[in-house]
Image (tube, grey):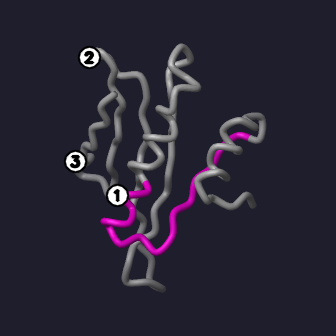
Amino acid sequence: MEIQATPQEGKQAVRFSAHENGAEVGRAYLYLIHNELHKEPWGLLEDVFVAEYHRGNGIGTALVEAVIKEAKVQGCYKLLGTSRNSRPKVHAMYEGMGFNKY
């Protein structure tokens, strides 16, 4: 599996895509958000998706790890992610990676 990071032109965002055998099998976005209280941006992890046939193989974890790494490179003082309450496996993955549930 290969993960590519592509800055989104004209946006404060990076798109991450996971590829296997030349096909995209997953994606995630990091949005960089600035406010007046902090010099550094904060990050929003959004739109994490893995094709159904490829779920359970570590692709989602690899994508989120890539987003976390890039958020650190960008100097984000925090990283937030959202997920539907109906996805307990996804919540368990995020919590296992150090995210807190609120």
Q: CA distance from mark 2 to mark 1?
A: 23 Å
**Which of the pair 10/84 is nearer the observer?**
84
**Label 2: how many Cα within 10 Å (few below 14, some 14–19, many 20+):** few
Query: Sequence-wise, which precedes: disc 3 or disc 2?
Result: 3
Q: Measuring from the top left, give residue 97's x and y in whole percent.
A: 58, 53
Residue 90: assigned label: none
Q: Which label's residue is closer to the chain start, 2 or 1?
A: 2
Is residue 78 left or right of 98 when viewed as pictured?
left
CA–CA distance in space, label 3 to label 2: 23 Å
Name the residue tied to disc 3: 9
Judging by the rendered image, the residue that carries numbered circle 1 is: 70
| Residue count near mark 1 (Cα–Cα under 10 Å), binned few <14, some 14–19, many ≥20 | some
Q: Quadrant of residue 15?
A: top left
Q: Is residue 33 magenta?
A: no
Residue at the (42%, 65%) spot, across then down = 33
x%, y% of residue 91?
70, 44
Residue at position x 51%, y 63% in the image: 79
Image quarter hosting the C terminus: bottom right
Residue at disc 1, secondary structure: helix
Coordinates of residue 42 in the picture (x, y in percent): 46, 69
Residue under pointer 2: 22
Q: Is residue 7 left or right of residue 89?
A: left
Instruction: Between label 1 and label 3, give the one nearer the viewer.
Output: 1
The answer for how far apart the CA atoms under marks 1 and 3 are is: 17 Å
Q: Residues within 10 Å of mark 3 (few under 14, many from 20)?
A: few
- Quarter holding the N terminus? top left
Q: Are marks 1 and 3 in contact (CB under 8 Å)?
A: no
Magenta segment includes 74: yes
**Span colored in magenta:** 68-84
Image position of 74 with respect to 99: above or below? below
